């Protein structure tokens, strides 16, 4: 799996840059890590979002909060790693966070 190779390959910093080049957001990376490193149930909000998307509810029909998170992502750089990710996954979240923080600094 490409994502698994990128997240767990030999040269992680190079691999994380590849994620950025694919235009993956920080939030998307955290979601991938949550799938690869589950520890417990996801947040109710995340489960609701998945159900809304699966049954095809339009953005206009979503609550304001859910719509915002649908467009901007569930996770932000300033957030801690979610509780439903195991310890190894949390380490990866911190590594990815550092890459995205460096990218923000470089673009400022």
Image (cartoon, rainbow, N blue to C red):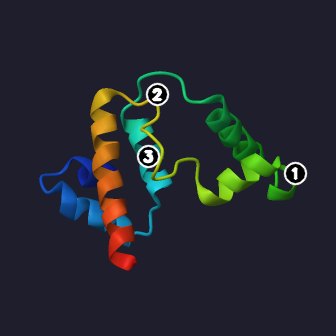
Residue 30, numbered circle: 3
Q: Residue 69 placed where, x, y %?
A: 66, 51
> Is 107 rendered above or below residue 45?
below
Residue 55, percent from left and from top:
77, 43
Residue 31 to residue 19: above or below = above
Toward the viewer: 95 or 22? 95
Q: Is residue 10 shown left or right of residue 19?
A: left
Left/right placement of residue 93 relative to residue 5 reads right
Task: Identify the residue position indicated by label 1 in the image.
Answer: 61
> Where does the image place residue 39, in percent across and percent down from the top left?
41, 23
Which residue is farthest left?
A: 10
Which is more toward the observer, 34 or 83?
Answer: 83
Image location of residue 50, percent across then percent down? 66, 41
- Within 10 Å of disc 2 (Cα), the crowding (few <14, some 14-19, many 20+) is some
User: Real-space Cα distance between discs 2 and 1?
Assistant: 28 Å
Task: Please say whether residue 2 is visible from this viewpoint.
Answer: no
Residue beneath the point at 30% across and 60% down: 99
Instruction: Tell me the SS state at disc 2.
Output: loop
Q: What number is the disc on residue 48?
A: none
Q: Are marks 2 and 1 in contact (CB under 8 Å)?
A: no
| Relative horizontal placement of residue 57, taking residue 103 as reference (left or right) | right
Query: SS at mark 3?
Result: helix
Name the residue at 67% across, 35% down. 45
Separation of disc 3 and disc 2 at Cα?
A: 11 Å
What residue lies at 44% left-to-right and 46% top-to-bottom? 30
Residue that carries the numbered disc 2 in the rendered image: 84
């Amino acid at each position: 799996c490409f994502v698994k190779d990128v997240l767990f390959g030999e040269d992680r910093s190079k691999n994380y840059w590849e994620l950025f080049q694919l235009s993956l957001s920080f939030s998307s990376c955290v979601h991938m890590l949550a799938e690869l490193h589950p520890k417990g149930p996801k947040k109710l909000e995340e489960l609701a979002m998945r159900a809304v998307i699966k049954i095809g509810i339009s953005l206009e029909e979503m609550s304001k909060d859910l719509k915002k998170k649908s467009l901007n992502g569930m996770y932000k750089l300033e957030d801690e790693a979610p509780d439903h990710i195991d310890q190894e996954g949390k380490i990866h979240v911190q590594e990815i966070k550092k890459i995205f923080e460096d990218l923000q600094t470089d673009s400022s």
